[in-house]
Amino acid sequence: MCGIIGYTGKKEAGAIMLDALELLEYRGYDSAGIALSAEAGGEPKLLKRAGRVKDLRTLCAENDTSGTCGIGHTRWATHGGVCDENAHPHRFGKVTIIHNGIIENYRELTEKYGLEDKLCSQTDSEVVAAVLSRFYEGDPYAAIRKTVLKLKGTFALAILFDDIPGKIFAVRNVSPIVAASTGDGAILSSDVAAIVPFTNQYFVVPEFHVVCLSKDRIELFDLSGDKACIDWLTVDWDVSRSDKGGYPFYMEKEIMEQPQVIGDTIMPRIKEGKPDFSAEGIPDNILSDCKRICVIACGTAMHAGLVGKSLIQAMIGIHVDVVMASEFMYNDPVVDKETLVIAISQSGETIDTLEALKFARKCGSPTISIVNVKGASIARASEYVIYTCAGPEIAVASTKAYTTQLAVLYLLTARMAMARGLWTKEKLTAYMKELMRVPKVIEEVLLRKDEIHHIADTMLNARDVFMIGRGLDYSILLEGSLKLKEVSYIHSEAYASGELKHGTIALITEETPVIAVVTQDKLKSKELSNIKEVQSRGAKVILLIKGEEQIEQEKIWYRIFRLPVMADEFMVMPASVVLQLIAYYVSADKGLDVDKPRNLAKVVTVE
Ligand code: F6R
């Protein structure tokens, strides 16, 4: 959470930082600010305010923002409410900082260093500026070292010292920082998204290392002051993928990109018609020897894990647990050498997933992560990594990352079946053919977006929406429901259809739209009976059903959407895209800020 940017070079830093902060706004959008280093040394110019980056832009337009070195921040509030004083950067003595993360011992530090009446904000971050300032006696490295050794918690810090103009220092623990050379200077950020407009070469600042950006070089040191080697990485998406491409919102663009990015994710991993993870170096024995699987993830990524669970249990016959990463550590997790642990994360930075993964490794579990952002912390903390090729996902609500995670899980299931010698050649061929059809089938759904828009229109004034289904249908509805509530603010719940009558059916009235998904042949008759139960209570049922399935009395349905036909286990894909588009259109038609729903942030780096 919180976006971080720093630039020093030949160009105007103010303009560069404002553009970058707009790209980083998905990390948090409560307030924003910049500090511009004074060219001749002395106090930097500080401009910050509560609100969006566009409000900061207005403030900057009213002020002098000249200068070629600066740091900038967009905030997702944790400690201290949303107000100008709590916006970053924070300044104390000769030190100006921006911070992403949480300093858990900020109260002890405040007391220890007698800061109670010296601070201007309620943030944990200002305390770091004060401690740094206390230790700063002209040697930035010594001050940073002494400070970070006192901090408990997570942090990515970018720092300006008044008497070292033109240089930016940064250090981190857990929270990410990447850095790069821009040709005319140097840049650092919390995300590669802000770096891509300048270069495709970057590196991840290692934990507890200090990076120093000057106009003509980048230097990296460990905490004892020894020079460290830089491990350069290449971003494989270009800047055009970070713009809206003519769509009103990133969410729509990202939904539309799914045929392409699913293809990009699966095709390089299919060799001679078979799933292949040799490029990732994943040995087959990892997939064949495990006795159980434990998936750890949060939110949408966890919902992808639930689909994976149904697939693997049905097709491989081994037990799969899907655990919310945020609960993992508090339930006395039982994972061992025989448990394959799969961490799923778009950003690769979700702190709960990262901590759970590190725990699993300590327990000796083999680990595979499915991550979208190259070089992210989860990818690096895991034994093996499979990158989804979704490209930058800017909308806070995840769409294409989810379906590419599913695509990887389909591939892994097939590879696991091969490694265990479970399927016949014919079965594998049929399965892989169906997987390769997914991009085309999703394209068919996207071409029918107007039809889906009409369905979404029926929900615009709803207070509650229920979604019901069984088995795989229930798994995807959990995701469909999350999508609807997060972008449209309509209360929505996904229910296993058989469970409804154990209490929740009391909430169904004539005013309640119910979305029912029926795609699994073996569950169809039971699902249809459950739907009747809500119809009898007056609910307006919107039915998503597979292809030309025969259903009685077409007119009892409020709306019907017939999904393109795939093998049952793949129906998740077209159905998910319909649910994504419903959520999108409801939000857009309600005039909401689709890409930046209230209170949310794209990258969740606090527990
Ligand atoms: C919802 C959404 C979140 C994320 C969750 C995990 O649309 O995007 O639920 O899925 O915060 O994030 P990652 O995948 O980055 O670990």
Image (cartoon, rainbow, N blue to C red):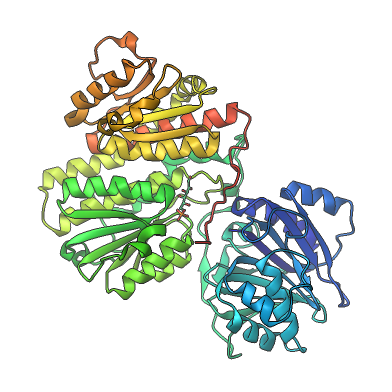
Q: Does residue 236 appear left or right of residue 56 in this picture?
A: left
Residue 176, picture quadrant:
bottom right
In the displayed structure, would residue 181 be above or below residue 86? Answer: below
Specify whether 192 is left or right of 525.
right
Q: Residue at x 12, y 47 (%)?
A: 425
Q: Considering the image in quadrants, where does the N terminus appear? A: bottom right
Horizontally, residue 336 falls left or right of residue 330, namely: left
Answer with left or right where residue 440 lies relative to residue 25.
left
The count of marks equals 0
Whether residue 412 appears in this view of the structure is yes
Q: Is residue 559 above or below residue 466?
A: above
Instruction: Please provide percent x and percent y for residue 372.
Output: 45, 56
* Front residue (pair 460, 576): 460
The residue nearer to you, when weighing 100 against 107, is 107
The x, y position of residue 423, in whole percent, is 12, 49
Q: Is any atom of residue 16 visible in this view?
A: no
> x, y (%) of residue 223?
58, 86
Image point (51%, 26%), residue name: 463
Residue 141 vertical placement versus 536 (above, below): below
Q: Position of residue 339 (x, y in %)?
A: 23, 65
Q: Please report the residue visible at 43 percent of the width from the left and 52 percent of the height from the top.
A: 389
- Front-lying residue, 459 or 583: 459
